[in-house]
Amino acid sequence: YRLGDVVIGDEVMIGANSTILPGVVIGDRAVVAAGTVVHKDVPPGAMVAGCPMRIVRMNEPPSE
């Protein structure tokens, strides 16, 4: 049984019908695909998808 706050970073995109379970932290600039069940933390810049969630790719940090 999970408890805790969900923390969503800056510039995060979350697709439709995604489920984010309690206690999860989603890092900055992460992308969650539609229909994903987010059951663990998402690292910054990651694109995740699926049920159960898995990392599809890591995005490059933005150039300045």
Image (cartoon, rainbow, N blue to C red):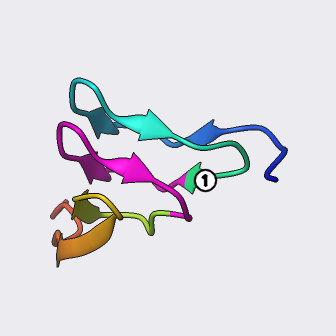
* Badge 1 element: strand
* Direction from residue 30 to residue 43 in the image, left or right: right
Total numbered labels placed on residues in the image: 1
Q: Which residue is mark 1?
A: 25
Residue 13 versus residue 40 in the image, above or below = above
Q: Is residue 19 left or right of residue 33?
A: right
x and y percent of residue 28 in the render? 43, 51
Asked if residue 34 is among those painted magenta in the image, a careful observer would answer yes
Residue sitting nearer the eye, 28 or 51: 51
Q: Nearer the viewer, residue 50 or 58?
A: 50
Q: Which residue lies at the image location 55% right of the left edge and 64% below the top edge?
A: 41
Determine whether, in the image, residue 21 is placed left or right of residue 53: right
Magenta stretch? 26-41
Query: Residue at point 18% right, 37% down?
Result: 34
Query: For the view shown, which residue lies furthest in the top direction?
Result: 16
Tell me the quadrant of the picture where the C terminus can be found.
Answer: bottom left
Q: Position of residue 48 (x, y in %)?
A: 25, 61
Most frequent secondary structure within the magenta stretch = loop
Please rate how many residues cluster around mark 1, counting C-alpha atoms within 10 Å: few if below 14, some from 14 to 19, many from 20: many
Q: Taking 12 as reference, is 27 above or below it?
A: below
Q: Position of residue 46 (x, y in %)?
A: 28, 66
**Residue type, label 1:** Val
Query: Going 21% across and 32% down the picture, which residue do you hit?
Result: 15
Please tell me in which quadrant of the rendered image residue 18 appears.
top left
Image coordinates for residue 61, horizontal then vertical, percent: 23, 68
46 on left or right of 4 = left
Most foreground residue, 40 or 42: 40
| Residue at x-position 18% and y-position 45% | 33
19 and 30: which is toward the camera: 19
